[in-house]
Amino acid sequence: MSWHVAALNLDNLGDLPKRCRNCVYWELSPKPAEQAESYGTTDLEKEAWLSEVLLEWGSCGRIVYVGGAPAGYVLFAPPASVPRATEMPTGPVSADAVLLTTMQVLPEFAGEGLGRALAQAVVKELTRRGVRAVEAFGDARPGTEADCVVPADFLRSVGFKTVRPHHRWPRLRMELRSGLEWKSDVEAALEQLFNTVTIPLQAAAPVTAAPARAGRCAVSFVPPEG
């Protein structure tokens, strides 16, 4: 089944799962978040946060669609736009990094590699914008609270390295150049293959000129299952 990744904006914000659409865990500090929940205005706060970040900084999220249906999403933003980051015990986020706040793939689409696809989409976007690194607070014990923090093991599996350990909320970092190795490693392997494998000419074919050197194959990188 086909899938594609689209930028998160105000038009497709409603494609997030309802619980995530109304969650302001990262977008507000604890006390304002509690007040918004008690007033029933978390959806408005989420929309206001997204609008502000889009206007002041630019694209800050991606949604992956499978067969036209939303299957997962990721959010990222400058640390100054993420109030909850100041409450994390392993902060602050490095000055040269953007913070990946949350990432989820819906259970019915698990095991299809969509988490890696979302991570790669973040790497591609931030690298294009000249960002040096991306950091994230990982959850060392996922599943025991709300799924607002990305599991630390998953972050490590896609190239993040721990920069500040913690029994529950380690801070991890990926240099964006290393993130691009997912694609460059595959391209390098294909180039080596094409340069070393010799395809014999047909015996009956007249040799009128030297065979043209094979050009670089244009491939579409598909991230490994994650």
Image: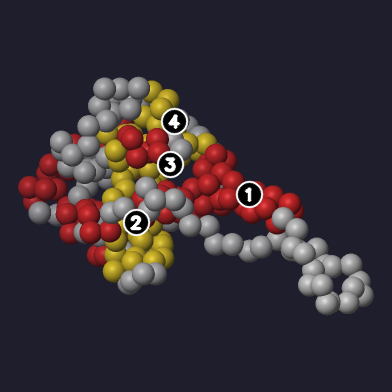
Ranked by sequence position, the earlier of labels 2 and 3 is 2
Tag nearer the camera, 4 or 1: 1
Tag nearer the camera, 2 or 4: 2
Q: Provide residue 144's location: percent of width, then percent of height.
A: 15, 36
Crowd around label 3: few <14 · some 14–19 · many ≥20 (10 Å): some
Image label count: 4
- The crowding category of the residue bearing disc 1, from other C-alpha atoms within 10 Å (few below 14, some 14 to 19, many at least 20), is few
Q: Residue at x 82, y 72 (%)?
A: 203
The numbered mark, 1 or 2, whose residue comes first in the sequence reads 2
Q: Are marks 2 and 4 in contact (CB under 8 Å)?
A: no
Task: Work out whether mark 2 precedes mark 4 in sequence or the reverse, and give the earlier one.
Answer: 2
Q: How did the renderer colour the structure?
A: secondary structure
Q: Which residue is mark 4?
A: 161
* Crowd rating for badge 2 (residues with CA inside 10 Å; few <14, some 14–19, many 20+): some
Label 1: element kind = helix
Q: Circle 2 sits on which residue?
A: 112
CA gap, disc 3 and disc 1: 19 Å
Residue shown at the point (31%, 53%) measured from the top left: 111
What secondary structure is found at the residue carrying circle 3? loop
Q: Nearer the viewer, mark 2 or mark 3?
A: 2
Residue closer to the observer: 214 or 143: 214
Q: Amino acid at mark 4?
A: Lys
Disc 2 and disc 4: Cα gap in Å? 23 Å
Task: Say which amino acid is labelled 1.
Answer: Ala
Q: Quadrant of residue 135?
A: top left
- Which residue is label 3 attached to? 158
Using the image, tell me which numbered label, if any, was put on residue 97.
none
Q: Tell whether 73 sits left or right of 158.
A: left
